[in-house]
Image (cartoon, coloured by chain):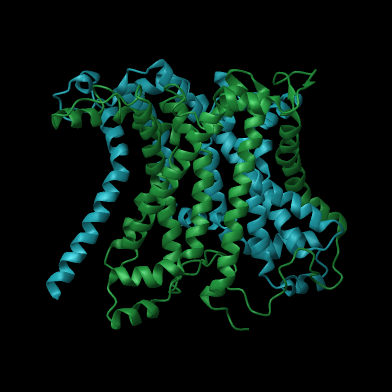
Chain colours: A cyan, B green
Amino acid sequence: MYRSRFWSRALIYSLLALAVLIVLFPLVYMLGTAVKPNYQIVNLRASLWPSHFEWGNIVRAWDSAPFGRWSINTIIFSVGSTIGQIGSSLLAGYAFAMFDFPGKRVLFYILIAGLMVPFSTIIVPVVQILADLHWLNTYQGLIVPNIASALGAFLVRQFYLGMPYELGEAARIDGASEWKVFSRVYAPLATPIISAFAIISFLQNWNNFLFPLIVVNTTSMEVLSQGLSVFQDQFSTNYDLLMSAATLVITPILVVAVLAQRRIVEGITLGAIQ
Amino acid sequence: MVPSPPGARSGPLAHAGRAPTGRVRLIRPRTTNSRGRGVSRSRGVGRRPLALSYLFIAPAVLLTALFSVLPLGMLAWRSLFSGGVFATSLSYVGLQNYSDALSQGGTRALQVTAIYTIGFVVVTMGFGLAIALLLDVKLPGIRHLRAPFIIPLVVPSVATALIWGNLFAPDFGIVNRALSALGLPQADFTSSPSLAFLTVLTFGVWQFFGECVILYLAGLKTIPLDLLEAAGVDGAGPWRRFRYIRWPLLRRHTVLICVVTTLTGLQTFNQIFVLTNGGPNGATTTALFYIFNQGFVQFNTGLADAMGVILFGISLFITVVLVGYFGRGARRSV
């Protein structure tokens, strides 16, 4: 009895260890290759792990393309989009949950329609609209179409529907305006749900590739993912440089992922309820 | 004010774990006599700050209308016309774009999309469920093994696809080195259609099965422990506890995860762009890649729009059918 329990535990741990190994292996391989001298990569006899570390590879990768500029663009794009998504979702979700106004049902259906249209199916007309606005190759072209988040508004609305309306009454009796009631009483209560939503939105925006790819086509406006794909075309056989560049792009997000893992898990679970 | 039982939660994935640990509860348990959830249900006593209401909803609703609803209308309308992306003079061609799209590689793209999506859904969900079941076992230290599975989901997929390309590279790639070491012939993963397809698919699975792990794990946490313990006392082994308790109780989660994974699979783009660019010979050109290629590379906007309408129709159909099925299942299991 005791023995079979030991073996089943050992089996569970080793299966999980194997799965973790498969998940992490590509990243370990990337790090190993990034700091390896190129002659060791093309030598089939050489070991997979570098004999000595060529940290200069990473510096060389950084210097071979405008990674600094791309990082700034990515930060502006993803932070701007995320702040917009949080703000618009919080306001709309609150109003749909707490206020009554003519046309509420129709306006809510417009929002839900946004949830049902996968962005990838409408890439061509979106670019046509942005071209008409002269917003191609601009920050507003990258950020503004991303601001509305039907999912975010929907989540916030659900959250406030579960909140008692009477919570704001005390403040109202004291003469607080509706804006004050929202910003001082209700908005702070939404912090947990907003932070889980924010981290997921931020990561999605940061990793968004298709949208910047179709909106932006000058090197100085490109984001990191885009820049990396250009880099790949330029240095397709320089495996050490390619992996160094990938390391540059992955490492900051890896740090965020490790630090915020609990919120990310909450956000993933939250995001699936559509 | 009795908190409803776990099975009656309105969200498909209830957030509160079965053990109320110190974790933050995202959604408070709904009370049975709470206000109605209907859109038009009145809240508050005559509280109608009209101007403020419209001001609050304006950014979300207007931008959704401008960048989701309007483009959808334009897509449907312009799929009936021929003319370039920025063309001002369009000529009406009826359903010509649709038949052209289907005869010029579109049918193949839809087939590739279907095979890719089915393979992707089955494998990610299978792996996801298996790992989630292992992670749900109460063993010391197992909680910390959850974190690695979210990493492929959140790091930039263009970068990880680049690594993938390196792993499967001819000659120096580690997969080919392993094949050589085993005395097997090397495989060229970029020029063989089926191998290129497999490279793209395995990347998709590697990237996304963590999402299924997290979602299934959230589902497993809603299953009452005493139910499993009672079955254990009655002599049900792990397989029967899974088959007769966990699997039926996870049904709603399975359908929901299936919707999420299917929509993800249909929208696969990044690794195709990085790894194969739709090739070789269209073997990895999915419907979305077809839209991108026709719209922004070949500038056949009409064909791209027609395929956009088709892909939208498929996504909508899948969502409605599966969510309809899901709604039915949810009612039954309450």
Q: Nearer the viewer, residue A204 or A129?
A: A129
Asked if residue B38 is positioned above or below residue B64 in the image, the reply reads below
Q: Which image quarter: residue A84?
A: top right
Q: Nearer the viewer, residue A227 or B189?
A: B189
Name the residue at 67% across, 42% down: A147
Residue B241, x across and y down, in percent: 34, 72
Question: To which quarter of the image does residue B42 belong?
Answer: bottom right
Q: Classify residue B220 as left or right of residue A118.
A: left
Left or right: A251, with B329 as reference point: left
Residue at left 46%, top 58%? B215
The residue closer to the viewer here, B299 or B21, is B299
Q: Position of residue B250 (x, y in %)?
A: 45, 65
Task: Classify residue A263 as left or right of residue B194.
Answer: right
Is residue B285 visible from the viewing direction of this image? yes
Residue drawn at x 67%, y 23% as measured from the top left: B301
Measuring from the top left, give residue A1's x and y in whole percent. 14, 76
Q: Relative to residue A29, is residue B229 depicted above or below? A: below
Q: Is residue A203 visible?
A: no
Does residue A13 appear to the left or right of B150 in the view shown?
A: left
